Image (cartoon, rainbow, N blue to C red):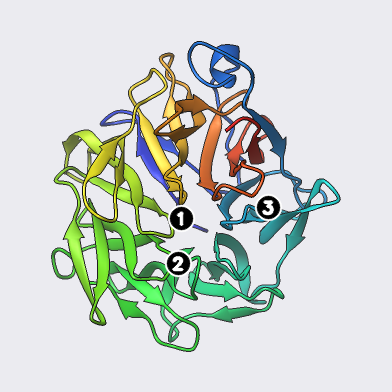
Amino acid sequence: MPRLTALVMASVTTVLVLGCESRTPVGLTNELDVPSLAKGGPGGGTEFATRTPLPPLPGGQHGEAYAVDRAGSLIGGYSWDKAGRMHPVTWSLVNGSWQITAFSWDAAATSAVVRGINDQKEKAGTFWPASAPRAVIWNAAGNFTVLGCNELGEAFGISSGAQVVVGTYRSTGSSNAAVWRPGQCRETLPDLVAGSYAVAYAVNGDGTIIGGQSVGVPVRWRQVNGAWQIEQLDSRRGTVFGANSAGDLVGAVGSACDPSPTVGCSLDIGIVWFANGGSRTLPTLGGNITVPRAINSAREVAGSSWLSNGGGVPFIWSETLGMRQLPLSNGGWAFTISDVRADGTRLVAGAGGRPFSAQVWSDRNP
């Protein structure tokens, strides 16, 4: 069974699951349809974005969109079929409508997912043969290559301009951040503390800056003269979830944290860490939690934020326009954002609503 892809704690003891890839579709309990917020943030105004549910596989329903290419032309994620199997899929616009395409996978696998797309339309993701994950890359034609040298591992991102895939590999009793390139064995990224748990979630355009976590704190890896160096980004517990082509990173840290494994941490403060140094703390939509998941080349951020009534909703943030809720009744999450397209718009993709399904938003008045 695929493991949870992101955990966000709304309090020190309460866990909310963002994108669970479970066999039981996730239903949200908050009935949210706030017109003023859905029209661009507190104070109202004309609606700035349109939402489109992405189609599932025939007979299926539940799915999530985790990745979009920089051009905003191809979205990736997963969709369940009517037999209850999770397929790696992409969505693309055909004659003005979103069409779904499922990709081949290892015959021994029980499920698979796409988690990253580069400029060449290559997709990075994970197979689960016999519940043992393998990092994989699909080329533009849809043919797959299992990455590494027969180790267990999961892929969470791919560089936009290269075949550099990042994620985590598993060995006995531990998980370590890893880099894969087709035809090569993995590279193991250094830990802050040797032998501790680490994972890489995001990578920049040329594959030289990677973001994730080590020993439970957000970190950045840089490749300098062919060697990987690790840098701790914050003293609080947290992680990096996304990167843009320049290497700006985005993620969340905990405002209050008990490091004991039985209690855990509250990841509720959204932060941008700039590639050239410094950081920016993001606002909320009135609640006390903001969890960014992606950042584009214009430093626009997408993710989930909580309203004052406690409901989680997708958002887009920019320095000039601030925090804006994306329209979606019943709550949901934004996982990825494209660069600004030729017409001045950008795509945000994620999941939510009722029935729970993959979603895409396109803004009309950036």
CA distance for labels 1 and 2: 10 Å
Residue 28: mark = none
Q: Residue under circle 2?
A: 154
Secondary structure state at the residue bearing disc 3: strand
* Residue 104 shown left or right of residue 64 in the figure: right
Secondary structure state at the residue bearing disc 2: strand
Are the residues flagged by discs 2 and 3 in contact, CB closer than 8 Å?
Answer: no
Q: Residue under circle 3?
A: 79
Marked residue nearer the N-terminal end (3 or 1): 1
Residue closer to the observer: 230 or 265: 230
In the rendered structure, which amino acid carries the disc numbered 2? Answer: Glu
Q: Quadrant of residue 28?
A: top right
Near mark 3 (Cα within 10 A), the count class, few <14, some 14-19 or many ≥20, is: many
Which is closer to the viewer, label 1 or label 2? 2
Are the residues flagged by discs 1 and 2 in contact, CB closer than 8 Å?
Answer: yes
Q: Residue under circle 1?
A: 3
* Residue 255 shown left or right of residue 271 in the figure: left
* Residue 117 shown left or right of residue 59 in the figure: left
CA distance for labels 2 and 3: 18 Å
Residue closer to the observer: 88 or 98: 98
- Image location (x, y in percent) of residue 91: 71, 54
In the rendered structure, which amino acid carries the disc numbered 1? Answer: Arg
In the image, what residue occupies the spot 22% across and 42% down?
A: 262
Q: Is residue 4 above or below residue 332?
A: below
Marked residue nearer the N-terminal end (1 or 2): 1
Marked residue nearer the N-terminal end (2 or 3): 3
Marker count (numbered): 3
In the image, what residue occupies the spot 58% across and 66% down?
A: 119
Residue closer to the observer: 128 or 178: 178
In the image, what residue occupies the spot 42% across and 55% down?
A: 244
